[in-house]
């Protein structure tokens, strides 16, 4: 079964980076990981023999950049997931949007400068009070 135009549009939307310089795009490895997470959540792993047993959890302590499955073709896996569960495209779109937001937030934290004492007067007040 081929993907519909709407499903292809959703996939394109989540895979492309936003307009800002901190925008995040999702490649095949990340998208394949998301399909694997959905298959695990929906108890469909028996249908996906190519997914490893040691799949890291979506919400865990693993660095976000490691949440990927390289070597597993994304679109055929996604199509297979849609055949098994009709509404899995919505699940994928929501999970991918959430993951993109987490990746963008991580980039923002890495790029953001630390505040100076002038920008954070309450911290200065606390430091002065503690020293007296």
Image (tube, grey):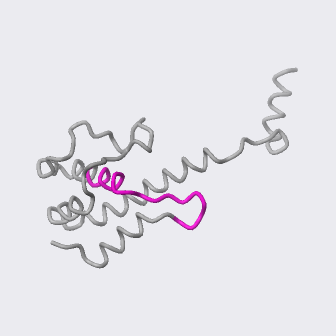
Residue at image position (81%, 45%) is: 119
Residue at image position (17%, 62%) is: 80
**Residue 12: image location, x then y, percent:** 38, 69
Furthest residue to the left?
46
In the displayed structure, would residue 68 be above or below residue 128? below
| Quadrant hosting residue 60 | top left
Which residues, given as a range, are shown in magenta? 18-36
Taking the magenta stretch, the answer to whether it contains residue 29 is yes
Q: Quadrant of the C terminus?
A: top right
- Is 24 on the left or on the right of 60, as rendered? right
Taking the magenta stretch, the answer to whether it contains residue 5 is no
- Is 23 on the left or on the right of 125, as rendered? left
In the displayed structure, would residue 5 be above or below residue 57? below
**Residue 74: image location, x then y, percent:** 27, 58
**Residue 51: image location, x then y, percent:** 21, 46
| Quadrant hosting residue 92 | bottom left
Q: Quadrant of the N terminus?
A: bottom left
- Is 120 on the left or on the right of 15, as rendered? right
């Amino acid at each position: 079964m081929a993907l519909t135009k709407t499903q292809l549009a959703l996939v394109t939307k989540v895979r492309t980076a936003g307009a800002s310089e901190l925008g995040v795009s999702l490649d095949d490895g990340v998208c394949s990981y998301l399909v694997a997470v959905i298959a695990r959540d929906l108890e469909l792993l028996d249908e996906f023999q190519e997914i490893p047993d040691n799949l890291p959890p979506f919400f865990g302590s693993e660095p976000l950049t490691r949440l990927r499955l390289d070597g597993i073709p994304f679109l055929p896996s996604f199509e297979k997931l849609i055949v098994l569960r009709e509404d899995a495209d919505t699940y994928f779109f929501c999970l991918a949007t959430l993951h993109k937001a987490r990746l963008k937030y991580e980039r923002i934290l890495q790029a953001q400068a630390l505040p100076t004492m002038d920008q954070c007067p309450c911290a200065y007040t606390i430091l002065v009070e503690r020293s007296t």
